[in-house]
Image: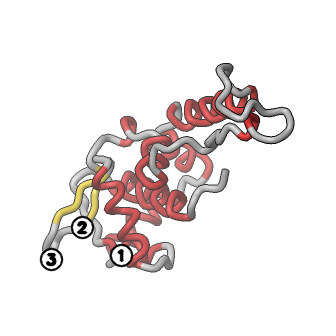
Amino acid sequence: MMMSEGVEWALHCCLNLAFLGPGTAVPGARLAAFHELPPVYLHKQMQALVRAGIVSSTPGRRGGFQLARDPAHITLMDVVAAVEGQEPAFRCTEIRSQGPSGSGGTTQAICTIEAAMRKAEMAWRRALAEQTLADLMATVERRYPATPRRISSWFAAG
């Protein structure tokens, strides 16, 4: 399964907002400029995050986007689902009912391939649901201690 680049963009923006702390609203254009992203396309991702209740948007001159929840309560799966949707990655179309070995109609037993794909997708979704923005923040702070300060400084200078 290939996720859109919007997932990466949304996760990085959420992480940046998390490092900036609660109450700090950042205009979408400024978020886009930080990673040199196209503002119009990033805005679509940010609006998906607003609809999902992950970020909030404040209009006006001092407005922008900020996290709507504590980073410990935002999972990677929340962000992926907001941007990509909830549809399953694999869709069984019951091709086993066609061709020389098929029954010509639907079969009663669950397709073995569909069951295996669902199991794998559930493991993937669980792994994403077990990781929060707070977990990512802790990893960044441990591996790259200067990064949170660099992010805060860059946005403060804007």
Q: Nearer the viewer, residue 93 or 144?
A: 93
Q: Which mark is residue 64?
A: 2
Residue 114's x, y, as percent? 68, 32
| Lateral position of residue 79 relative to residue 120, left or right | left
Q: Is label 2 in a helix, a strand or a loop?
A: strand
Q: Nearer the viewer, residue 25 or 10?
A: 10
Residue 70's x, y, as percent? 32, 40
Q: Is label 1 in a helix, a strand or a loop?
A: helix
Residue at 61% in and 42% down: 91
Q: Residues within 10 Å of mark 1 (few under 14, many from 20)?
A: some
Residue type pointed to by label 2: Gly
Asked if the residues shown at circle 1 and circle 2 are in contact, with their CB atoms under 8 angstroms apart, the answer is yes
Asked if the residues shown at circle 2 and circle 3 are in contact, with their CB atoms under 8 angstroms apart, the answer is no
Q: Which residue is mark 1?
A: 30
| Lateral position of residue 51 relative to residue 32, left or right | left
Q: Residues within 10 Å of mark 3 (few under 14, many from 20)?
A: few
The answer to which quarter of the image holds residue 41 is bottom left
Residue 86's x, y, as percent? 46, 43
Above or below, 93 relative to 30: above
Distance, label 2 to label 3, CA atoms, is: 8 Å
Residue at 56% in and 61% down: 4
Distance, label 1 to label 2, CA atoms, is: 9 Å
The answer to which quarter of the image holds residue 59 is bottom left
